[in-house]
Amino acid sequence: RTQLREPVLNDELPGRIITGKVLIKPSIKEVKENSVIFNNTPKEEPIDIIVFATGYTFAFPFLDETIVKVENGQASLYKYIFPAHLPQPTLAVIGLIKPLGSMIPTGETQARWAVRVLKGINKLPPQNVMIEEVNERKENKHSGFGLCYCKALQSDYITYIDELLTSINAKPNLFSLLLTDPRLAFTIFFGPCTPYQFRLTGPGKWKGARNAILTQWDRTFKVTKTRIVQESPSPFASLLKLLSLLALLLAIFLIF
């Protein structure tokens, strides 16, 4: 059950708990008109408001249910984008997914693939194949005490992105890069999976992607260096000054 919910913490929460501005209470035993009784606490405590942080459900009230139907927090969308039962791919839903990673590059990659499908450049598989994949995805999701929307939409970030990039021939080939650009290949393989990699090849490739990948750590550490620190003198420079001073003293000694 604990795996079906992930905590969302705010940076200010620990400090407010320490200072007593936020009090942690046990579960509510009873709610009265203007007070509540907590478990293991017989005393009533006055309240002003109760916030039910139950999350939300998604729906498409502007569409007929024959187009997109939501059941148990899930929509029958192929790759979380195209309604699997439509005879023609004339509708694409972008962003209805919860990747275990950044949402912005995920939505961008969805849009890149969807546009190519709508233009007829990429083709979707047969309808029965799409429906089978959607049903398989639904069966593999956690159920527990109720299928929450977050788990129904949850997907592995890198695996999902790779699937879409492969469909549009935009996934970088590490083996090919290892032969042509070993430095870039090692940086991609051993470094973080940043969105620059999605623009190395294929439609919409960006010529600045390589340099952005090779310098991504420079930008990462740059923002953490807020103090102006004087650079320490080079040991070679100090040694050169010392030798110059010794040479000057030797010259003075020889002259006089």
Image: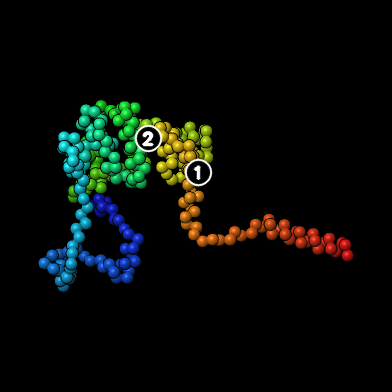
Of label 1 and label 2, which has the lower sequence position?
2
Label at residue 165: 2
Query: Relative to residue 241, is residue 151 drawn left or right?
Result: left
Vertical placement of residue 218 versus 210, above or below:
below
Q: Mark 2: few, some, or many residues within 10 Å (few <14, many ≥20)?
A: many
| Residue 1 in picture, x, y percent from top left | 23, 52
| Residue 170 in picture, x, y percent from top left | 40, 33
Q: Given the image, on which type of amino acid does mark 2 rest?
A: Leu
Q: Given the image, on which type of amino acid does mark 1 rest?
A: Leu
Front one among 67 and 164: 67
Helix, strand or loop at label 2? It is helix
Residue at image position (76%, 59%) is 244
Label at residue 214: 1
Measure the alpha-carbon separation of dots 1 and 2: 21 Å
Residue at image position (16%, 37%) is 64
Helix, strand or loop at label 1? It is helix
Query: Relative to residue 149, is residue 181 drawn left or right?
Result: right
